[in-house]
Image: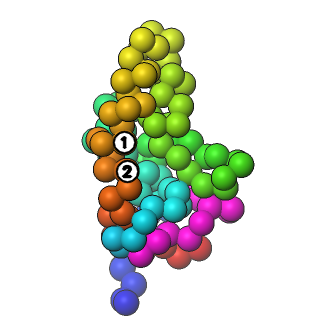
Amino acid sequence: MSRPPPHAWQVLHIHPEAPQKPALGTACNGCGVCCLSAPCPLGILLSGRRTGACAALRWDEGQARYLCGAISQPAEVLGPRMLWAAPWLGRWARRWIAAGIGCDSTLQVER
């Protein structure tokens, strides 16, 4: 694979214990690359940003992997004003982010 030109690079601050990015189409392993590069449509709604790391992304120390906070900690992601919606967000977020479908990130990672 050829390297992209320097102007196409993006620096991601990945947790040193995060797993390596899986191959495109294989099962998600919580590497965090996709969510650290930009929020998905759900992340845009939750964080109010279109670029940079998703505000809903959470590092799980026990599992040594990244998790979507909309699934793992919906009440924390929504905050106290939207706490009533947390049970629905936790259920629907899996579908909205296509959890379990496989890695869809075409980014190439160099550590």
Q: Position of residue 10 (x, y in %)?
A: 44, 63
Please give left or right for residue 15 compared with residue 34 in the image.
right
Q: Position of residue 110 (x, y in %)?
A: 53, 76
Q: Is residue 39 magenta?
A: no
Residue drawn at x 34%, y 70% is: 25
- Name the image colouring: rainbow
Q: Is residue 16 magenta?
A: yes
Position of 76 relative to 38 (above/below): above
Q: Position of residue 23 (x, y in %)?
A: 41, 75
Count residues near mark 1 (Cα–Cα under 10 Å), then give few for <14, some for 14-19, many for 20+. Answer: some
Position of 73 relative to 33 (above/below): above
Label 1 sits on residue: 94
The reply to whether discs 1 and 2 touch (Cβ–Cβ < 8 Å) is yes
Label 2 sits on residue: 99
Q: Which residues are magenta?
A: 12-23
- Is any atom of residue 49 visible in this view? no
Q: Secondary structure at mark 1?
A: helix
Q: Amino acid at mark 2?
A: Ala
Q: What secondary structure prevails in the magenta region?
A: loop
